[in-house]
Amino acid sequence: MTHSVTVRHNFETAHRLPHLGGKCTNLHGHSWWCEVTVSAPRTDRGTVAEFGDFKAGIRAWIDTWLDHGTMLGATDPLVGALGEEKCKIFRFGAQDDPTDAEKLAADLTAPTVENVAELVFRMARATLESISHASGASITQVKVSETHVNAASYRPVP
């Protein structure tokens, strides 16, 4: 048997995907939703993870780095223009002086919904490691929805 808990959070963020062509080449925004699931084979004190700390850590990271900002590939020409305007930018694939947060996406080249799900997984794993949790607890799934009909999931390979 396995116990699981899930934290949900939403954020408003723009992105663009010029490498794909079509309408996603344009800068556009979404009301993103993420669900992060933590599972454990058994619970310590009846909990998988200290829910309040886990929820606060995930929400604080997303609100600081993604919410009301723009996610772009590091080589996107809009990075410079939006940076000059002091806009919040999160760069995927940043190699030149990335922030600690951007290092989580250094090998992810574009802000696709699949890559955003993997980024949230990496952040959530670090958050889980920093709080009280049951023995054997791990992030078992992250689901990110960019619209009501488009979503991606990321699950680590056991």
Image: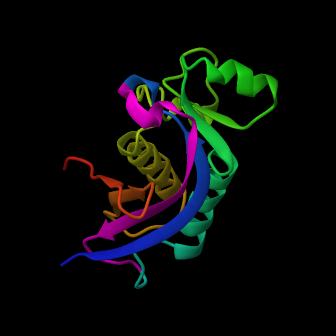
In the displayed image of the protein, which residue is found farthest to the bottom? 46
155, 144: nearer the viewer:
144
Q: Which residue is drawn at 60% across and 48% down?
A: 13
Q: Where is residue 148 in the image (x, y as percent from the top left)?
A: 41, 64
Instruction: Judge whether residue 36 is colored magenta.
Output: yes
Q: Which residue is drawn at 37% across and 57% down?
A: 142
In the displayed structure image, the side of residue 47 where residue 52 appears, left or right? right
For the image shown, how many numbered marks are present on the structure? 0
In this rendering, the answer to whether 113 lies above or below 89 is below
125, 87: nearer the viewer:
87
In this rendering, the answer to whether 94 lies above or below 14 is above
Q: Residue at x 65, y 51 (%)?
A: 67
| Magenta stretch, residue numbers | 20-44
Q: Residue at x 47, y 30 (%)?
A: 25
116, 95: nearer the viewer:
116
In the displayed image of the protein, which residue is found farthest to the right? 85
Q: Position of residue 87 (x, y in %)?
A: 76, 35
Q: How is the image coloured?
A: rainbow
In this rendering, the answer to whether 121 lies above or below 96 is below
Position of the N terminus by quadrant: bottom left
**Which corner quadrant of the image does residue 110 belong to?**
top left
In this rendering, the answer to whether 137 lies above or below 2 is above
Q: Where is residue 143 in the image (x, y as percent from the top left)?
A: 36, 59
In the displayed image of the protein, which residue is found farthest to the front? 23
Instruction: Judge whether residue 83 is colored magenta.
Output: no
Q: Where is residue 14 in the image (x, y as percent from the top left)?
A: 59, 43
